[in-house]
Image: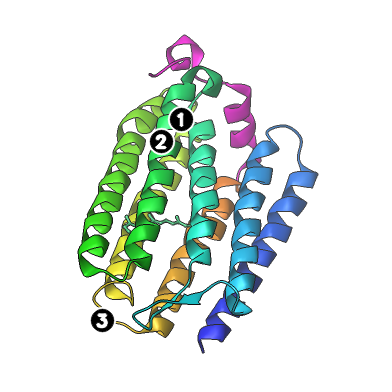
């Protein structure tokens, strides 16, 4: 059954990638939103393929099977998801490199410390790194909620509405990841490996494919976002 869910992941991410690339070839302007989103599902496709093939996990000293490929996937895809959001919210991303770098840097720090928490066989280090990683998650979501929501409000109504939906989806789903971690084999083992794989699969599909569908649902809005329309002088710099 574990392999079955991993194969569902391969198919879901694969179909998502094909669809986003196809849509990208059909539109003009702001195509980078399509390529970034397709890159996200492509990386997850490879990761699920590796895990389904039995290549993406290792047996730790305490006997646990640890799927490290998940973390490689998240290390690449979570910054790309945040980049999509930043490009949507900011009228002049080039003038807010510091803000974008802080957001992505904090996110990478969250995944790396999460990897240490997940792969440590020492309960003390698992707890410490879990707390550090969760603090970084709070920082990422705080930045999103404050700076990026504020920036998105200065954009056109269409851009601002899509941003709000995506940011709320992101905040809710991202908070669920550490909860699944705690429930699963890395945490309190309230659920077994199979349930953990299933729950992460549902979250991954919603956070990547669901996110992509929502983001790319209205091309006109992406054109406005890419063209820097709607914001005027107020939107030029938020940091
Ligand atoms: C871990 C465990 C340690 C504590 C925290 C975590 C957060 C993980 C997150 C992952 C998000 C992944 C996404 C993937 C694909 O789309 C590493 C589980 C805070 C937030 C969005």
Which image quarter holds the C terminus?
Answer: top left
Left or right of residue 9: residue 119: left
Left or right of residue 25: residue 163: left
Residue 43 lies, in percent from the top left, at 62, 57
The Cα atoms of the two marked residues, 2 and 1, are separated by: 5 Å
Q: Which residue is mark 1?
A: 100
Ligand 1, seen in the image, is in the quarter at: bottom left
Residue drawn 39% across the image and 19% down it: 238
Residue 44 lies, in percent from the top left, at 59, 61
Camera-side residue of 192 and 148: 192
The Cα atoms of the two marked residues, 2 and 3, are separated by: 32 Å
Residue lying furthest top = 233
Question: Can the viewer see residue 167 in this picture?
Answer: no
Q: Which residues are magenta?
A: 218-239
- Element carrying mark 3: loop
Q: Categorize mark 1 by other alpha carbons within 10 Å: few (<14), some (14-19), many (20+).
A: many
Q: Determine if the C-beta at disc 2 is less than 8 A from ligand 1.
A: no
Camera-side residue of 5 and 56: 56
Left or right of residue 31: residue 78: left
N-terminal label among 2 and 3: 2
Q: Which residue is mark 2?
A: 103
Q: How does the figure colour the protein chain or chains?
A: rainbow
N-terminal label among 3 and 1: 1
- Element carrying mark 1: helix
Q: Which residue is mark 3?
A: 190
Question: Can the viewer see residue 35 in this picture?
Answer: yes
Residue 17 lies, in percent from the top left, at 68, 58
Residue lying furthest front = 61
Say whether marks 2 and 1 touch (CB < 8 Å): yes
- Element carrying mark 2: helix
Q: How many numbered dots are placed on residues in this image?
A: 3
Camera-side residue of 102 and 95: 102
């Amino acid at each position: 059954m574990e392999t079955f869910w991993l194969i569902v992941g391969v198919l879901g991410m694969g179909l998502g990638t094909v669809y986003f690339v196809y849509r990208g070839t059909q539109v003009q302007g702001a195509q980078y939103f399509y390529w970034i989103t397709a890159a996200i599902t492509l990386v997850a496709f490879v990761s699920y393929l590796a895990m389904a093939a039995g290549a993406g996990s290792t047996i730790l000293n305490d006997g646990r099977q640890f799927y490290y490929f998940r973390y490689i996937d998240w290390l690449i895809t979570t910054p790309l998801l945040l980049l999509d959001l930043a490009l949507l919210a900011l009228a002049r991303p080039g003038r807010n490199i510091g803000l974008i770098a802080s957001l992505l840097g904090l996110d990478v720090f969250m995944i790396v410390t999460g990897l240490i928490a997940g792969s440590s066989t020492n309960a003390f280090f698992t707890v410490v790194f879990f707390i550090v990683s969760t603090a970084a998650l709070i920082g990422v979501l705080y930045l999103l909620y404050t700076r990026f929501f504020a920036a998105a409000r200065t954009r056109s109504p269409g851009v601002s509405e899509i941003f709000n939906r995506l940011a709320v989806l992101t905040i809710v789903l991202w908070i669920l990841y550490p909860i699944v971690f705690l429930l699963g084999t890395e945490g309190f083992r309230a659920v077994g490996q199979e349930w953990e794989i299933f729950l992460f699969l549902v979250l991954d599909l919603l956070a990547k494919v669901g996110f992509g569908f929502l983001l790319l649902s209205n091309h006109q809005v992406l054109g406005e976002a890419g063209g820097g329309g709607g914001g005027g002088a107020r939107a030029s710099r938020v940091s």
